Amino acid sequence: MVENIPEDVGRAAEQGVDNTVQDVENVPNDIGNMVDGAAKWIGDQIGGVEGEERRAENDVNQFDQNVDNSYQQGEQQGRGNY
């Protein structure tokens, strides 16, 4: 009703101020959550790179071992032919 308009507007304004105050009070926590999220993401990326590094190192070691084995087999076969 028309006679309730001032009271309704006052209540809405108070509620808007309360929401704004709460939003401002939440800023430090929100920033902390964003920093934590960014730090976790960076950690995940670094962990992924470290995992890829270990896999690549294992692949190189395996390749080196395979080359050594192939060389030794060829050497033994070559000696058997003479």
Image (cartoon, rainbow, N blue to C red):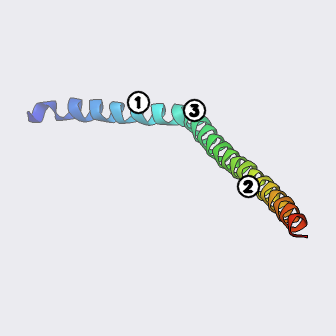
- Which amino acid type is marked by label 1? Asp
Query: Circle 2 sits on which residue?
Result: 59
Snapshot quadrant of residue 38: top right
Q: Secondary structure at mark 2?
A: helix
Q: Residue at x 75, y 50 (%)?
A: 58
**Which image quarter holds the N terminus?**
top left
Q: Position of residue 19 (x, y in %)?
A: 40, 33
**Which image quarter holds the C terminus?**
bottom right
Give residue 29's mark: 3
Q: Please name whichever residue, 5 or 65, is drawn nearer the observer in this view of the structure.
A: 65
Q: Position of residue 61 (x, y in %)?
A: 80, 53
Label 1 and label 2: CA atoms lie apart by 60 Å
Mark 2 nearby-residue class (10 Å; few <14, some 14–19, many ≥20): few
Q: Please name whichever residue, 76 or 55, is drawn nearer the observer in this view of the structure.
A: 76
Q: Residue lying farthest front?
A: 82
Marks 3, 1: nearer the viewer: 3
Q: Position of residue 31 (x, y in %)?
A: 59, 39
Q: How many marks?
A: 3
> Looking at the image, is mark 1 or mark 2 earlier in the sequence?
1
- Which amino acid type is marked by label 3? Asn
> Looking at the image, is mark 3 or mark 2 earlier in the sequence?
3
Give residue 18's mark: 1
Q: Residue at x 52, y 36 (%)?
A: 24
Asked if 3 appears above or below 46 in the picture, the reply is above
Give residue 42's mark: none
Label 3 and label 2: CA atoms lie apart by 45 Å
Q: Are marks 3 and 1 in contact (CB under 8 Å)?
A: no
Q: Please name whichever residue, 47 or 28, is drawn nearer the observer in this view of the structure.
A: 47
Q: Secondary structure at mark 1?
A: helix
- Which amino acid type is marked by label 2? Asp
